[in-house]
Amino acid sequence: MNQVLILTKNILAEQEIQQKLQALNYEVYCSAKVLESCVRGSDSSELFNHFQFIILSETICESEVMEIIQLIGDHSIRIIRKVEEKVTEMDHQYLEEEVLHAIISNEDSVDELRECLYALKKNQESKGHTYETKKYVQLSDKVSLIKPNVSQNNTASPEDNYQFLEVLHHLSQTETKILFILVQAGNKVVTREAICHLIWNEDVNKSHLASLSSTITRIKTKFEQTNLTHKAIQTLWGKGYRINPELLDRIRKNEMLNTVVSNG
């Protein structure tokens, strides 16, 4: 039996979703106390080991969602955000950047929840061995969005590489330097402060951080003309930035792209 942990500020608000999950034979644990512990920063690592899915209620604000996600850390648990009826722009961004794995609502039917959870479970088991071009998959007319299984496309065509080369040639010197820093870091997250220090070689201030944010946005925008599945740079709130694994793989495998980034 699969175990689901629902974190909420009001357990009465979760009765409907709890009943639907139990109808699907999921063992559901709903708690406001665990949420309080997470927000206070208490170590709940041992508890998370007992669940395959964690649902973050719509009663939890965005800043608290990020605190909880950071506590979950490297656990293999699937993180699901529950919303009232509309998905916020921030939740869309979390989904795209793999901070969340799915978004659901009370309006989703038992059938839709079944398919959503099954898809998440299969994605976890397959460990990213399929390739999709969608940023997310919508399973219902209400909400039910899931993060698709994504892996690198190993058969890049010359046209694809030319497309990326064009973008790289249109990056400014600072933009290229940031991209180079992230490529060097590989799959690791680089803090905003570390990037600022490497670019300006002086004590980091608010002006540097603001400039960095604007530059990252410009880089993302320029790469939107390519066929990248997700944003060129992933923003991990409260942690820093990480290069899109697909873009990293492409640059590392193509000598011309690698040269442009390294010499930029």
Image (cartoon, rainbow, N blue to C red):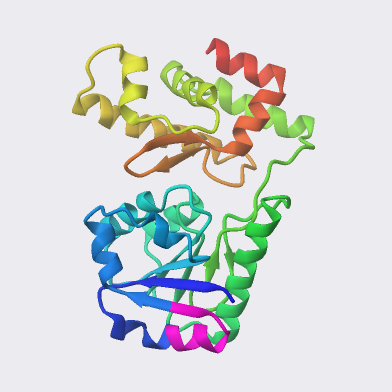
Q: Residue at x 59, y 37 (%)?
A: 245
Residue 154 seen in render: yes
Residue 75 lies in the magenta stretch: no
Going by the image, does 177 lie left or right of 131? left
Question: Considering depth in this image, is 190 or 144 the residue closer to the camera?
Answer: 190
Q: Residue at x 64, y 18 (%)?
A: 258
Picture layout, residue 125 above or below residue 57? above
In this view of the protein, which residue sits in the foreground, 166 or 129? 129
Q: Residue at x 42, y 35 (%)?
A: 241
Q: Is residue 60 visible?
A: no
State the extent of the magenta-drawn residues as a range.
18-28
Residue drawn at 75 percent across, 32 percent down: 159
| Whole-percent x, y for residue 227 in the image | 65, 42
Above-or-below relation of 257 to 15: above
Q: Quadrant of the N terminus?
A: bottom right
The answer to which quarter of the image holds residue 123 is bottom right
Above or below, comparing residue 39 to residue 82 in the picture:
above
Q: Position of residue 131 (x, y in %)?
A: 71, 50
Locate residue 26, reporting x and y percent: 54, 80
Q: Nearer the viewer, residue 255 or 47?
A: 47
x, y percent for residue 116: 58, 72
